[in-house]
Image: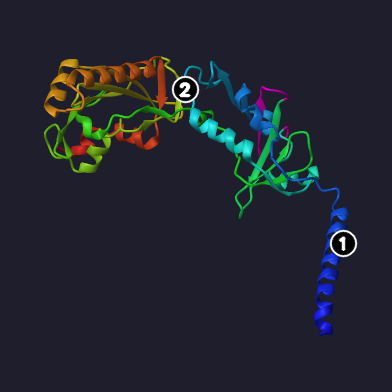
Amino acid sequence: MRARQLLPWAVVTLALAAAAWWALGRQARGDLPEAGLALPGLADRLDTLEGIEVHGAGDVRLVSLRRVDGRWEEAGHPGWPTNEREISRALFRLSEARRLEAKTKDPALHARLGVEDLASPQAQGAELRLLGGGEPLRLVVGSNHPGLGGSYARLAGESQAWLLDTDLSPARNPVDWLDRRIIDLPLARIERVRVEPVQGRPFTLTRRDESFLVDGLAPESADDAIATAAVPEQLALDGVAADDGTPAQRQHVYRAVDGVSLTIATWAGEGGTWARLSVALDEEAALAWFARAGDEAAPPEQRLASLRAQVLEWQARFDGQRFLLPGQKAANLLRERSQFLGAR
């Protein structure tokens, strides 16, 4: 009975002891900074931001985004659209990022986390600078935690480093901030491709069922012919620049069943294969195709108007631009006739 009476007092005593230990621990660690948001106040400034910069080793500016008429534009690619959706998502993640754990505040140890001063030519991290709506916000983002995945970071000008709860590593290649789509002309719409090299024999790929013949002959590899015919499907860029008028070494003219004609003229240049694109529309062929295909929901004239608007959009997108093509897409455009047919 006496033991039962003492039990509540024992629990109270243990609780008081634990509280005292916690209080002592807090006093002993009183110099540790408080956790919280990685960039306090950013959420209230998202709509007033005017610039986003990424700086690398040697404090070299790698990326410069400026808000122009409500849309982001990358300084090195004026006039080409950025990936607005991904930029918005990245800013939201940044505004929500939280500090998980305080790390070193010793500058001599910052390099271990990749958050050393960006003035160093050997700096591993990158600095995000957010401009507009108040004093610039500057966050040095270093390595990721090997297990948890969050980034190590510190506010520029402060020595305290933190482990954050999310990966905030900014893209250092300006192209990664762009809308990388060039065109999407599905393979199902392609009926033939005319290949015209400056040197060498021209040839034509012509659809037959689900494959393509090469000058009327079955290719040694049906997959290779299909891959060349499919180049305009979800065609993306690895780089974009103003067209400098470099002569093309070959061109591919893609003809679609609905009257769209796409020309991809290519040449070897710095970094790989570059291309200029042009597009046209045979409206009579388009109307005939729509009439044959049939669509109760939309008459041929309405579908033609929609296709015409798409072609005009593509023309505006291609005008005055040249594009660095991804390696695999480029390889599919470089095949010679003999590579499809052997000695035939």
Vertical comparison of 104 with 294: above or below: below
Residue 311 inside the magenta-drawn segment: no
* Residue 41 position within the rendered picture, expressed as x and y whole percent measured from the top left: 69, 32
Q: Quadrant of the N terminus?
A: bottom right
Q: Nearer the viewer, mark 1 or mark 2?
A: 1
Find the residue positioned furthest to the bottom: 1
Query: Depth check: 256 or 46 in front?
Result: 46
Residue 198: image x %, image y %?
27, 21
Amino acid of disc 1: Ala
Position of residue 68 in the picture relative to residue 217 (left or right): right
Question: On the image, numbered disc 2 is attached to which residue?
Answer: 81
Task: Identify which residue is drawn at 20% across, 21% down.
Answer: 259
Q: Which mark is residue 20?
A: 1
> In percent of the image, x 54 and y 35: which residue is there?
89
Q: Is residue 171 visible?
A: no
Is 131 within the magenta? yes
Which corner quadrant of the image does residue 214 belong to?
top left
In which quadrant of the rendered view does residue 230 lie?
A: top left
- Residue 242 location in percent, x, y? 45, 17
Q: What range of the chain is rendered magenta?
A: 119-135
Amino acid type of disc 2? Answer: Pro
> Residue 63 falls in which quadrant of the image?
top right
Chief secondary structure of the magenta span? loop
Image check: 194 left or right of 14? left
| SS state under label 2 | loop
